[in-house]
Amino acid sequence: MNKNQALHSFRLRNEGAGIKQQICSMIADTALFGDLLWADIVALANHLDCYQVPSKTTIFKEGEDGNYLCLLIKGKIEISKADNNGIQRMIVAIGKGRSFGEMAIIDDEPRSATCVAMLDCELLVLDKDNYRIILKERPALAAIILEKLARLLSQRLRAVNGKFVEHLSYKDGDS
């Protein structure tokens, strides 16, 4: 599935005067990329698309092919995962400045969760093809992006491990 098919229901907001400057400002306000040098933010902005997503829209579904990550600029999204009975269970709700769908840039595995807009949202999207262009044209920036993604995923894994141990301790206490 290409990016255009996956994002077909979103309204692209890349036209108009000053959109690249707005995208730069949006990038600077994110937790993932806010500390980049301005020159790197400008370079990254050239490879991001800005989309408006209405409330209750599914951004992507668990099990689908994934080829893009999102930076949430405005709004709120819910990330959920199906349990063993196929019932969607909310993992987390995230707000402005956060990223999601990052694993799609790193691996070729299906989406591990479903993301739905809880409010009207604005997203910046970096797809795998544009990341590969950055890798070719600006390898130092690509390395910084990859390092940031690795650090973010490591932090999330550590948090999940902590919750898992708490869950095991709770279960042991019930016996």
Image (spheres, helix red, strand yellow):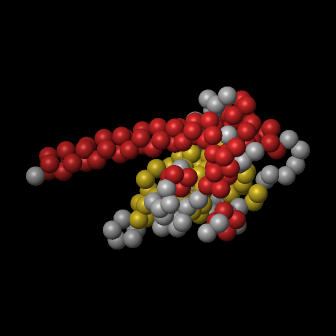
Q: Residue at point 54% right, 66% down?
A: 65
Q: Nearer the viewer, residue 26 or 152?
A: 152
Q: Would residue 56 be visible to someone looking at this image?
A: no
The picture places residue 161, in percent across and down from the top left corner, at: 31, 44
Residue visible at 57% across and 45% down in the picture = 99
* Position above or below: 151 against 108: above
Say which quarter of the image contains residue 33. Answer: top right
Which quadrant holds residue 158?
A: top left
Residue in front for this viewpoint, 65 or 19 = 65
Residue 145 drawn at (x, y percent): 58, 40
Left or right: 83 as drawn, with respect to 7: left
Residue 156 image position (x, y, % from top left): 42, 43
Horizontal arrangement in the rendering, residue 41 relative to residue 101 (left or right): right
In the rendered structure, the answer to whether residue 90 lies left or right of residue 166 reads: right
Camera-side residue of 168 and 150: 150
From this viewpoint, which residue is outermost toward the bottom?
85
Residue 47 is situated, as x and y percent measured from the top left of the image, at 72, 48
Give residue 128's quadrant in the image: bottom right
